[in-house]
Image: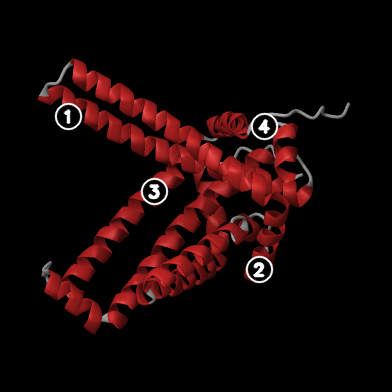
Amino acid sequence: MPQENISIGKFNASVIIVKESWNVLKKDKEIMWFPVLSGFLTLIVVAAMATFFYFTLLGGSTTEFKIDEAMEINNIVMYTTMFAYYLIIFFIVNFFQSALFIIVQGRFAGQDLNFNDGIQGAGKYIGKIFVWSLISATVGLILKIISDNFKVIGKVVAGIFGAAWEILTYFSLPALVIGNLSIKDSFKESAAIIKKTWGETLIVSFGVGLFFVAVVLLAIVISIGIIMLAPTTYVIILVSTIFVIFYIAMILLATTLSSIYKLALFNYARTGNIPQGFSEYIIKDAIK
């Protein structure tokens, strides 16, 4: 019997997507390790690059003269360092997200893959992942140079093209890893899917983010309320620590659930099959 059309608001759709993505996550809890590892390694890279930048370009000084002088004299070194930073970060994020996609794709197909399956699966596509990260880093650096050298107009142009790039390549990574397409074809595939889904994809993805913003704001209100009721140093430290941990957990959870939904949408747009665990009317509403 055909599924009856159901009209729901975008935020309600986002809540449903969060719940359904959460149900998928509960079956493969190990995928939460991928954003954790990605974030941890990213912090290490940021610290290493910041240290290199401080001692190499700034000569160990933080004075305004030294910074301006370093920027003027060492532009090539600065942008080379920035490119290396972009490349490493993109590669880390793309690799672990690919591992997540592989496990979730297995779940959609009725398989029960584990953490090692995800890592090994992503390893099979490491060449493509590296090339895609290289392209992303190149685009990022070009936009950064435009933004730095053309002042207000440069920032506007970089912002517009950066947003366009993010939208057009939204499904490129799943197309590379799950669709096993070439770099060129993955870009075409992503652009084709975006043409079908761009409005709903952006609105619902924003709604998913808004859902977690609401949760974090509620946590802030509760934290402030507890501190006001018991304004002692111990309570302030304890509540602040718990909030920071909660905030990080929400970021990791939002990232994971968004990736699950992205893959579900990619699967339906590409194959016409509703991924296991998702409501037909939610997925179809995003495609039509």
The CA distance from mark 1 to mark 2 is: 51 Å
Q: Can residue 105 be seen in this view?
A: no
The CA distance from mark 4 to mark 1 is: 41 Å
Q: Position of residue 18 (x, y in %)?
A: 56, 32
The CA distance from mark 3 to mark 4 is: 26 Å
Residue 259, picture quadrant: top right
Pointer 4: residues within 10 angstroms few (<14), some, or many (20+)?
some
Do callouts 3 and 4 mark residues in contact (Cβ within 8 Å)?
no
- Foreground disc of the pair 3, 4: 4
Three-letter code, disc 1: Ile
Instruction: Name the residue at 47% across, 63% down.
Output: 159
Would residue 257 be found to the left or right of residue 88 on screen? right
Three-letter code, disc 2: Ser
Three-letter code, disc 3: Leu
Q: Position of residue 276 (x, y in %)?
A: 70, 35
The CA distance from mark 3 to mark 1 is: 27 Å
Q: Is residue 129 above or below residue 31?
A: below
Q: Where is residue 37 in the image (x, y as percent from the top left)?
A: 39, 48
The CA distance from mark 2 to mark 4 is: 29 Å
Disc number placed over residue 182 in the picture, else none: 2
Q: Nearer the viewer, residue 191 or 11?
A: 11
| Residue bearing mark 4 | 277
Q: Is residue 46 visible?
A: yes
Q: What's the coloring here?
A: secondary structure
Q: Where is residue 288 in the image (x, y as percent from the top left)?
A: 77, 44
